[in-house]
Image (cartoon, helix red, strand yellow):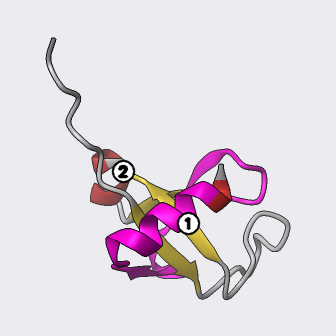
Amino acid sequence: MKKKAKQEVYFAVCINNKGYEASLEAGKLYRIVPDEEAESHGYLRVVDESREDYGYSADRFFRLEVPRPLERALLRVSS
């Protein structure tokens, strides 16, 4: 049986929620859902306040690299 490749997990902080106040909170950490097509158009797909993933302009976020132990903890909290 083939092992599934571990999907990379990324996070970003919202730095601009203007016009999306119900969906995004400025200063809040969001999980990024990898989407190469969205990124090629300048968007990030994030799991927002609706707990669904949507594409937003990438300039609304600051990407973070987090250490593996913190990544695991954040994933447990968001599940």
Q: Are marks 2 and 1 in contact (CB under 8 Å)?
A: no
Badge number at residue 39: none
Q: Nearer the viewer, residue 61 or 42?
A: 61
Expressed as whole percent of the image width and height from the top left, the position of residue 29 reads 60, 76
Q: CA gap, disc 2 to disc 1?
A: 17 Å
Q: Is residue 2 visible?
A: yes
Read off the magenta span: 47-76
Going by the image, does 27 lie left or right of 34?
right
**Looking at this rendering, what residue extends furthest in the left direction?**
2
Q: Secondary structure at mark 1?
A: helix
Instruction: Name the residue at 67% across, 45% down.
Output: 52
- Report the amino acid beneath label 1: Leu
Viewport quadrant of the N terminus:
top left
Badge number at residue 74: 1
Instruction: Name the residue at 67% across, 88% down.
Output: 27
Instruction: Name the residue at 73% across, 70% down.
Output: 24
Q: Secondary structure at mark 2?
A: loop
What residue does disc 2 label?
34
- Report the amino acid beneath label 2: Pro
Count neighbours of disc 2 (C-alpha within 10 A) and say few if under 14, some if 14 to 19, many if 20 or more.
some
Going by the image, does 65 lie left or right of 61?
left
Q: Of discs 2 and 1, which sits in the foreground? A: 1
Expressed as whole percent of the image width and height from the top left, the position of residue 3 reads 18, 25
